[in-house]
Image (cartoon, rainbow, N blue to C red):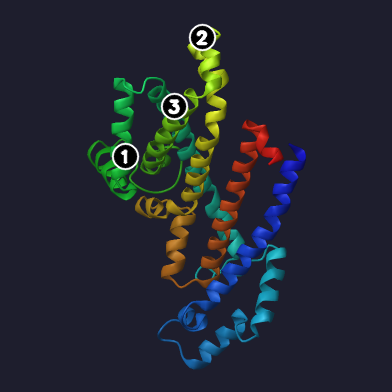
Amino acid sequence: MGPFALRRLLLLLPQALGIATLIFVLFRLVPGDPATIVAGPGATQPQIEALRRELGLDRPLWAQYARFLGDLTRGDLGTSLSLRQPVTQVLAARLAPSAALMAASLLLTVALAVPAGVAAAVRPHSTTAQVVMGVSVLALSIPNFLLGMILMHYLSVRWRLLPAAGTGGLAFLVMPTLAIAARLVALVSRTTRASVMEVLGEDFVRTARAKGLAPRVVLYRHALRPALVPIITMIGLQAGYLLGGSIVVETLFAYQGLGQAMITAVSLRDYFLVQGITLLYVVGFLLVNLVVDLSYAAFDPRIRYA
């Protein structure tokens, strides 16, 4: 496991460098002059030129890239033009709420989806399986922002059980978590059902049943572990989706996370803040993929030698 993890960690470095380079190039290829966009429509030409010098945009492209990489190695992502704070400080303040929302959504997804999918796979023609599949189809058909508005209407406006918006204790997490996790629960439960049903039809499972082992032992000791690889893949993909997909939900509930910070930065033309949040999202996705790879090796040792 050690050499496998080390190889994956070493591969992460060129991937992160390539992503950082891609972000640098894409932000320079955006139509229009960044200094003109940041300065706004009422800025004069001397103000725009001064801003170009402040942002380092008057230098050659290779010098801008070298400065960009040098700042990254020091953890310097620039200064937010709208907040007049280092971008790293803004990200640090907004990362904890977004991480809490992501963790709560994933925990709720695993707690509900995996048992529901296993139950539907063990008895595929039962009422439980039909309910699981029906609820998953319904959850997939409702956009998360619409579900969030429904939750807000009933749980906050009509019944006054939860705060409608804001960031704070656990009460502020409930509705955003439900709005995000509904789609995830549907996807993971369907994947779990399909994966477990496929493994239950394998020869080694039939052999375990023929030996007289109890159905629970066959399921949890022999079938569930090899069925976890596709489930982990789906959970990892959805965790990556949460990094950027929570923007709409955070904005709807005025949740002070990275998603709302991104919307604010784009509306205020905060060049460095948008770039910093984008870089953080991409690095987070790479880390999620790393965790998924290591999980593969933990549940299926054959992957370590592939």
Give, as a three-letter code, the residue at label 2.
Ala
Q: Earlier in the sequence, mark 1 or mark 2?
A: 1
Count every numbered label the image shows and give the total. Answer: 3
Q: Is residue 261 above or below residue 41?
A: above
Q: Earlier in the sequence, mark 2 or mark 3?
A: 3
Residue corresponding to mark 2: 214
Give, as a three-letter code, the residue at label 3.
Met
Residue corresponding to mark 1: 139
Q: Residue at x 70, y 57 (%)?
A: 13
Helix, strand or loop at mark 2: loop
Q: Quadrant of the N terminus?
A: top right
Local crowd at mark 3 within 10 Å, few (<14), some, or many (≥20)? many
Pick the front one: 59 or 293: 293
Pick the front one: 20 or 230: 230
Q: CA distance from mark 1 to mark 2?
A: 34 Å
User: Is residue 123 found left or right of 50 in the rendered image?
Assistant: left
Query: Residue 77, position in %: x, y?
Result: 62, 66
Query: Residue 37, position in %: x, y?
Result: 46, 80
Residue corresponding to mark 3: 197
Q: Residue at x 54, y 48 (%)?
A: 96
